[in-house]
Amino acid sequence: MTTQPEPDYATPFKGLKVLDLSQGVAAPHCGMLLALYGADVVKVEPFAGDWIRPIGVQKGEHSAHSVYYSRGKRSIALDLKNPDGLAIVQKLAAEADVMLESFRPGVAERLGVGYAAMRERNPALLYVSVSGFGQTGPYRERPCTDTVAQAFSGLMSLNTAPDGTPVKVGAVIVDTLTGLFAYQAVATAIYARRDGGAGRHLDVSLMGGAAALLAPKVLEAAMTGTTPAAFNPPAGNYQTRDGWIAVTLVRDTDFPVICETIGLPEIGSDPRLKTFAERGKHLDVIREAFLPRFMERTSAEWLELLKAKNILCDPVMDLPAWLDHPHVQATDTAPVAAQPGFGDSPLVRVPGALQSPADIGDAPEIGEQGAEILAGLGYGADEIKALASGGAVRLR
């Protein structure tokens, strides 16, 4: 019997060269995932660095976002408006398998790093453009952020406070998911091109990422002509004497069980409230009865009572509590790595990956590997010094 070789599931993209001109979260997330699976990712930054570096909690040259989404990459700081800086990018693109960019449509072309120009030097290049609204359409040149994408997509209309106020999700959820969608598009294209052949231009947008996230809700809206109601009413968050808990329902029969458990059997037996659809019409009445009742006990007391009746519920934890949770600790879901200048950093694992962002090397400082990258392109020491003095590259 022939023994099958063990596939490299940890780093299947070892040897793959990625040129990452992107900034922010979405496309850099794609680049980090490629690095996670073994690709050599060269991050090209302006002299001031990726604009995400000073956003949010920051130490030194990094923010928490830039630490996570730059792991495993090598950085070179270039002035793309300098002819010598542009020439360096062109040399990197000629050797790359994948190129990532997140300029507004038209900007890459004006800088000389658009798809047509790069394809001339490297016909096999997989060129990935990540933008707000995509490369075509009347909104193509509009700027877009995660907040704008949450509003434009309808996500905020689904995520509302009890009084109906649209609420932004506190994490950069659309950017993060768009980066994941970009990665799956690249990984699929790499597989399709496994036997050689021409490259292609992959168009990925925050608008498209948000739409893909909401796809079933979009379908519901088309079917009903209105904003879809929340799932499984009265599922939601309820304030207790000392915190908040989330309670949900899977079956209609869960509702009378919850009502009985919290001491409101008359609500559970109300003939108007037998189904999810009917309860959705009378949600104000249900919550008016529920809210003061949940305030009568602590979170732990309610959770014990509800879980004993097989009702799905959990405390609403903050992130420090999540990090310290025994299950999170036991599963090593956020292993810690010492990021230079930033300190010990819990770096959440990518589901399914055999290694984590903590295993693939530090997030680089601005231009940290510039000299090394230039030497790899064949530039000599004197040439590298001349490029730096001429303003094409910023060296550490």
Image (cartoon, helix red, strand yellow):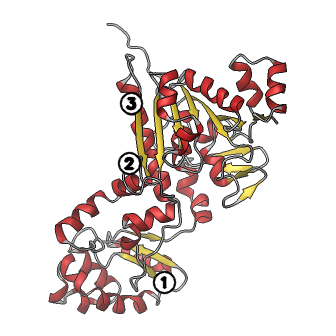
Q: Nearer the viewer, residue 35 or 219?
A: 219
> Disc 1 on helix, strand or loop?
loop
Q: Which residue is mark 3?
A: 189
Is label 2 in contact with label 1 (beta carbons under 8 Å)?
no
> Disc 3 on helix, strand or loop?
helix
Mark pair 3, 2: CA separation? 21 Å
Mark 1 or mark 3, which has the lower sequence index?
A: 3
Q: Which one is closest to the eye, mark 2 or mark 1?
A: 2
User: In the figure, residue 234 lies in which quadrant?
Assistant: bottom left
Image height check: is 175 above or below 82? below
Q: Which residue is mark 1?
A: 240
Is label 3 in contact with label 2 (beta carbons under 8 Å)?
no
Mark 2 or mark 1, which has the lower sequence index?
A: 2
Q: Which one is closest to the eye, mark 1 or mark 3?
A: 3
Mark pair 2, 1: CA separation? 49 Å
- The disc label shown at residue 136, or none: 2
